[in-house]
Image: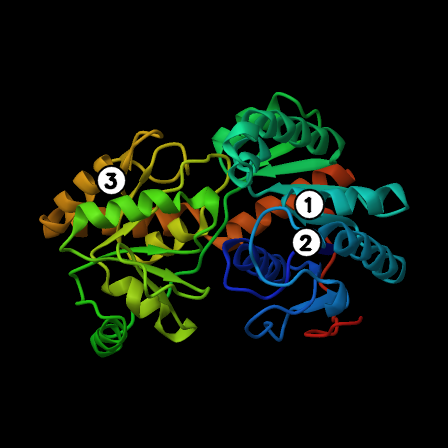
Amino acid sequence: MRLALVGAFAFPAPQGSQVYARDQALALRDAGAEVVMVCYGAGAGSTPPELEVVRIPRALSPLGFRSGPRIGKPLADGALALRLLHVHRRRRFDALIAHNAEAAAVGLTARALGGPPVVYVAHTLLEEELSAYAPEVARRSCDALGRSLDAAIVRRADATIALGSFAARRLGRVGRAPLAVIPPGIGAGAAPDREAIGAACARYGVEPGGFSLYAGNLDRYQEPELLHDLAARLSPHPLLVATHGPADRDDARLRIASVTPEDWRPLLHGAAVAVATRARRGGFPIKLLNYMEAGRAIVARQDQVDTLEHGESAWLLPIDADAGAFAHATRDLLADPDRRDALGRGARRAAAHHHHWPSLAARTLALVEKILGRSPRQRLPPQKTKTGTDDP
């Protein structure tokens, strides 16, 4: 099976969407598919050598990794659709796997011009997220616009992958094509040794086991103001924000660190508690997968993911929980190492049971085969392809 995995983003990049797309592409390749990533220009970090990547010119790609609407996006997306069609005419893809709504729009445009069927991977619900980028007075209108866009994409896509049951319920009301709930996956890795954890913590001014951590970007949909309030309530226990972007070290309330890739996992393993403040539902925050794989005690909101259970693998708060509720849960866990360890073990078990990439890739290929009218037994053996290239 030949698949184009389409992303309206720079690649690679240390952000959830790009990490998810990369890992899915590699898992599908391992499962026997021929996969080509089609995306914007190069981002940050190294491209996996076994992954074939086709890009639009860097000059047409938006700068930076910030989420949300940007002026240069329409031009970049038009170039991406043309690039996709050019590659499809040479490679004849069986299907496109479009990561997020913008890539789905690109894929649907290509399909209208002779491209293959589109499988939409709904990273989020625009009904929930779009208003995060708008002023208060326009947020209700943005919710309505997001709801209309969600429906328009799902109605036109040949199939949809929802990352959880909340999104599946919303999208299933408006779509008629096949819809499957398939969450992102993660591979289990060996824990960093004590020396690496201690050295990473020392570089960022925290003690192993003595701090809580938020890992990820500080875009508006992540509730950064709540993080500020939470840090003030947890004092003197530090709350460290580990981000890939520039760090504002002059922030009086919140300790923000621009973390290197080498320090990422040691710092996460050094945290006593890992928090996720995001309230907007419909996606699957990849940071939660990282927390689960690391076996951290997690404090997050209900309805964010299906695979965490309150009291077993996380401390889950109501969707409208404020900074006081987050502070109460975090303080209790900081004071109770036995409960922290039990929740961390439960989180790691949940990651191994529900987020195993080989089984998730098989389910994804089965969905593609369904829309193509194939039986899984008709799957062809993988073909040898060039890898790590920008032009097939």
Quarter assignment of residue 330: top left
Task: Give SS at disc 3.
Answer: helix
Q: Nearer the viewer, residue 370 or 116?
A: 116
Q: Residue at x 22, y 35 (%)?
A: 325
Residue highlighted by disc 1: 102
Marks 1 and 2, the one that precedes in the sequence? 2
Marks 3 and 2, the one that precedes in the sequence? 2
Q: Nearer the viewer, residue 68 or 89?
A: 68
Q: Position of residue 337 (x, y in %)?
A: 11, 52
Task: Give SS at disc 2.
Answer: loop
Q: Callout 3, which amino acid?
A: Phe
| Residue 1 seen anywhere in this rendered image of the structure | no
Indicate the colouring scheme.
Answer: rainbow
Is mark 1 in CB contact (under 8 Å) with mark 3?
no
Q: Nearer the viewer, residue 293 or 284?
A: 284
| Residue 74 seen anywhere in this rendered image of the structure | yes
Does 108 sit above or below residue 65?
above
Q: Residue at x 27, y 64 (%)?
A: 269
Q: Position of residue 167 (x, y in %)?
A: 53, 31
Is mark 1 in CB contact (under 8 Å) with mark 2?
yes
Quarter assignment of residue 321: top left
Measure the C-alpha gap from mark 3 to mark 2: 34 Å
Quadrant of image for the C terminus? bottom right
Residue highlighted by disc 3: 326
Task: Give SS at disc 1.
Answer: helix
Q: Position of residue 185 (x, y in %)?
A: 48, 52
Q: Callout 1, which amino acid?
A: Glu
Residue highlighted by disc 2: 8
Q: Position of residue 297 (x, y in %)?
A: 24, 50
